[in-house]
Structures are given as structure tokens and as C-alpha cells.
Amino acid sequence: MFIGWPRCIVCIDMNAFFASIEQLLQPKLRKKPIAITNGSHGSCVITASYPARAYGVKTGMRFSFARILCPAIIQVASRSAIYEAFSKKLMQILHDQFSPDIEVFSVDEAFLDMTNVYHGFTSPRALAKAIRDCVMKELSLPCSIGVSGDKTTAKYAAKLHKPRGISIIEPAISRQILAPVPVEALCGIGPGTKKYLSRFGATTCGSVGHIPVSVLSKKFGIKGQRLWLMCAGKDPDMVRSIIKPAQTMGHSKILPPGVTTSGLLLGYLDTMAFKLTYRMLLQHYHSDRFICKIVSVKRAFYYELALDQPICDYELLAQWLHQIGKRMVFNGAIKRVQITALDLTQCIQQDLFNTILPARSRPIETVVASINQRFGQSAILPARLGSLFKKVQSSNVISPSWKGAVPVKQKNSIWD
């Protein structure tokens, strides 16, 4: 352990991960502006290479607008299985060569707790350099490293100098370093939290310290205390090496311009329902609550389906979404749709008097899922989905619940 460091947390953040992988595997793309999209005709930029970012291209931007900013940009279809394989290799390397106390934070980010590890490095910078060089040697991919005494500060540090940067924020001065930083720069502080803090004049991490902890606790519960400590450079959250079972699973899709009819909308909703139940079936998940969010140019619509019993039934979900689509009043084009299953469970308590067969008693959907798992996600699917399926076929590892794409046993690591 380094002198004056109660804890040593390292954040590894891969640089333009998907784009870097494509440039590694396709040498003709190296040093060129590229954008990764869902399919060769995807409308949304998943990530972009640094040459493209220099023109202002950002994640979530429509590719048509990215092409205006950067006329020479090259569109590259995402390949989820390849990215997933690289991610697993990365986490395995970090686990085996640096610390067993590792938290897989996302497909391209991880935390290492070096507090109880004898590593032999004389300084935090030497440790960070060794990790960065090891990743480059083993995977030929660039990454940035942040080192501090807590997770939030280490993650903030990893973002400071990209690409290939190393940033060290010593625990003794982390509060002073974070004081002028805007609150939204810290991981986990979104627009809603930022707006609430601004009521008290707290727009920077330092100004959050002037808010009594009791006020934040009343609003956010135990998370309010953590919020106050995060802004003070003392995030108490531990590195969690045990992966908790998924609580939600869903898909979100930014639609191409011109979706102004119920027919087109229904096609996208239907296809996403198939994708969601496919993933749930493979991991034996069921849910009794589903939400659907439809965002138009002018407003957002929320719908919820509450059931008496958890299900994983594509036909039932498709019927519900069909009713939603037919009732929609179009005030402008639809920009985005999202379908999410809440309160996931792998156990079903069957009602003694319920005559409806539970989802696991319907073998046809399980057979379809197993065939698609073996031969490809669109090997077999309802005929009505054929024309749109490829357009909405997104990478599971890109979604917020990307870990659900990697079947793992509870209490095992992501690479098991």
C-alpha cells in the first residue's frame, strides 16, 4: 500500500473500445474517422474513433448529422460477439495479473481494488503504467487509467486525459481537486439530481458540501449520504466482485427519420418484444411488469403492463404493444422506443387455481430461442418481423443491461 493511501482504487477505461477493436481487426480503418452503428445502415452512432470525435461526432448522435460534421466518416456495423470476447479477455487479464478484487463496471470499464494486494509497485503512477502497458501488450488496445482512494474519484480521473492517459488523484487532496468540478461530471449524478442540487446553489462538488447531509438523506435515502461523500472525494462504495442477478432487462432503439405511422411503429415494437423475450428465455428470466416508452418530437409516452404472474411470453407482450401502437396519436415523428422488463425473477410461484399455462410450459418459444442461440439471432423468427429485424438488431453488450448478454452464475465472475 502506498503511504497516505487508506484505499487504492484503479479505474480502467478503454478508449473508443468498439472503434479501436474494428481498427485493430481492419487495418485499413486505422487513423481514420469511423462511427460504429447498429448494422451497416444504422441511424445512431454507438461510438466513434478519435479522428471522428475531433470533428464533434459523439455517441448517440444521428449518423446523418455525423456525416455533415465529418464528410469522410466511415460507417462500420457493430459486431457484439467480438466486442464481448475482447471484454472478457480484458477482465481476465486484469483479474489474473493485477487483482482478484475486480468489478466489471461496463463492457469497457473496470475497477480494481489494490488495497489488500501486494503488487510491488513503488508509486500509483508506476502501477497505472504497468496496467496500461499490459492491456496494450495483450490486446493491442488503448486505455486510460485513473487512480485514487475511492471509486468515484478514480472514475473521474480516468476521464481526464484520453486517450492513453494516466491520472492520479491522491486521497489527501481529492476533496480540493473535486471542489471546482461540476456535479454532473461525477458518475451517477444525472440531470434530475443536478436540478435538485441546484435549488441549494450546489453546482460544483465543493458547494454540495454546504448542504446538510440530512437534507440529502431525506430526499435520496442512504444514497443521499453517499452523494455527499462522493462530492467530497470519499465515496464509501466498495469494489463489488460479485455480480448481482439482473433486476431489469430491456432494449431501446433510436428510430430513423420518418416514423409517423402506426404500421412502422408497430413493426419496431414487435421486433423489440421478440428480442427482449429471446434474451429472457436464454437466461430463464420472467417478469410481471413491463414498461414501454415512446418518445416523439414533442413529448414522451409511458405505458405499463402489470400481470398477476411473471411471464416470458412473446405473443402476450406483442399483443400489448400492438394495442399501444394502434392507440397512438402521432403529433410528429417518433424518435425513440424502449421496452423494459422490471423485477426480473427466475422463480415462479404458480397460482393453484390459475388455468393459464405459465411461460415455461410453452416449449415453442424455448425451441426458437435455442435455435437462434446456436445459428444466429435471426435464424428463425415470426414472418412479420423479417423486414425490420436486421434494422433493430442491436448488440446486447451495448445496452445498459449488457451484462445480461453474458450468462453467468450468481457469485461468479463475468468471465466464468
Image (cartoon, rainbow, N blue to C red):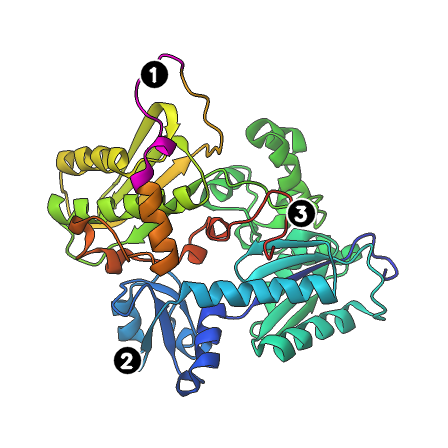
Q: In the image, what residue type sits under mark 3?
A: Arg
Q: Is residue 296 visible?
A: no
Locate residue 108: give its quadrant: bottom right
- The magenta region covers 352-364
Q: Where does label 3 land, which residue?
A: 240
Marks 2/3: CA distance?
43 Å
Q: Quadrant of the C terminus?
A: bottom right
Q: Is residue 282 visible?
A: yes
Q: Residues within 10 Å of mark 2 (few under 14, many from 20)?
A: few
Compare marks 1 and 2 and give the one earlier in the sequence.
2
Q: Determine the secondary structure under disc 1.
A: loop
At x 45% / y 50%, what residue is drawn? 400
Which of the two discs, 1 and 2, sits closer to the camera? 1
Q: In the image, what residue type sits under mark 1?
A: Asn
Marks 1/3: CA distance?
40 Å
Find out whether residue 359 is within the magenta segment. yes
CB-based contact (under 8 Å), mark 2 and mark 3: no
Q: Where does label 1 land, which residue?
A: 354
Q: Where does label 2 land, which residue?
A: 71
Compare marks 1 and 3 and give the one earlier in the sequence.
3
At x 60% / y 57%, what residue is drawn? 415
Q: What secondary structure is the stretch in magenta mostly built from?
A: loop
Q: Residues within 10 Å of mark 1 (few under 14, many from 20)?
A: few
